[in-house]
Amino acid sequence: MKAGIVLFPGINRERDMAIALTLASGSKPRMVWHKETDLSGLDLVVVPGGFSYGDYLRCGAMAAQAPVMRAVRDFAAAGGYVLGVCNGFQILTEAGLLPGALLRNAGLRFLSMDCHLRVERSDTVFAGHYQKGQVFRSPMAHGDGNYIADPATLDRLEGEGLVAFRYATPQGEVSEAANLNGSARNIAGIYSPNLRILGLMPHPEDLVDPLMGGTDGKPLFDGLAAAFAQAA
């Protein structure tokens, strides 16, 4: 798997993401600076978490205008795979690659804790090593993770099966209590219509090794590596 990780000033999760991708594929990802525009040869582009440009204006708004994001749009339009996590999800929505927006958490507090995610579908390259309905643990660390969209967009996401993960209890119940940031319909992650772009708020890359406290996030990266190895 040939992956590239996009770097902006203020991004701070690129090393965690690199560890997860390397463990899964055996290949170190390429670091792509925000002024670069050459994404040739890559199977996957990852926009990681952090605080790009200090989260000024809106989270991800300034990063969405960077030269590299024009290249990411072209990469996605050509059928490339894109993963955005936390600030990366915010950047993808600001860039128009995914619908909706991420606003301040419902409680107006930064959340740094574990949550549980329910897998809504498993027939994608991102979730292929999970089972539909499976619940896994994932760390969250964000102040602006409250996913919103207009009712028509939410209905379309539901109707087209584009909700990737929902906040749930460890038993898989989608409840208000499990929805710590207040996201519409407990949505934690969504896909693009062609299922090649995934944005999600929690950090599966932070649970890929027992030394990290667990491996709940590892199937996401193992699934990606297996899918690209099969396609090679």
Image: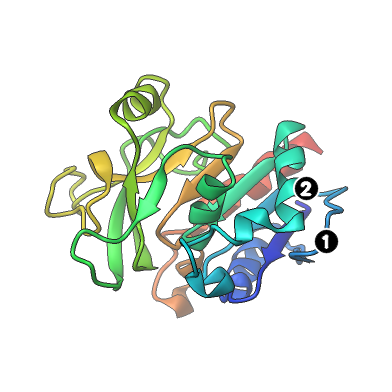
Q: Residue furthest front?
A: 57
Depth check: give the residue in front, 219 or 10.
10
* Residue type for callout 2: Ala
Disc ID at residue 36? 1
Looking at the image, do the residues carrying marks 2 and 1 touch, with CB atoms under 8 Å apart? yes
Q: Position of residue 94 (x, y in %)?
A: 53, 49
Residue corresponding to mark 2: 71
Task: Give the residue drawn at x 46%, y 59%.
Answer: 217
Query: Which quarter of the image is occupied by the C terminus?
Result: top right
Q: Is residue 71 above or below residue 32?
A: above
Q: Position of residue 158 (x, y in %)?
A: 34, 26
Q: Is residue 132 above or below residue 222?
A: above
Depth check: give the residue in front, 71 or 13.
71
Q: Residues within 10 Å of mark 2 (few under 14, many from 20)?
A: some
Distance of label 2 from label 1 (alpha carbons) = 8 Å
Q: Can residue 132 be seen?
A: yes
Q: Secondary structure at mark 1?
A: loop
How was the colour assigned to the protein in this rendering? rainbow
Q: Secondary structure at mark 2?
A: helix
Task: Give the residue drawn at x 58%, y 63%.
Answer: 48
Left or right: residue 77 versus residue 129 is right
Q: Earlier in the sequence, mark 2 or mark 1?
A: 1
Task: Give the residue drawn at x 16%, y 43%.
Answer: 173
* Residue type for callout 1: Glu
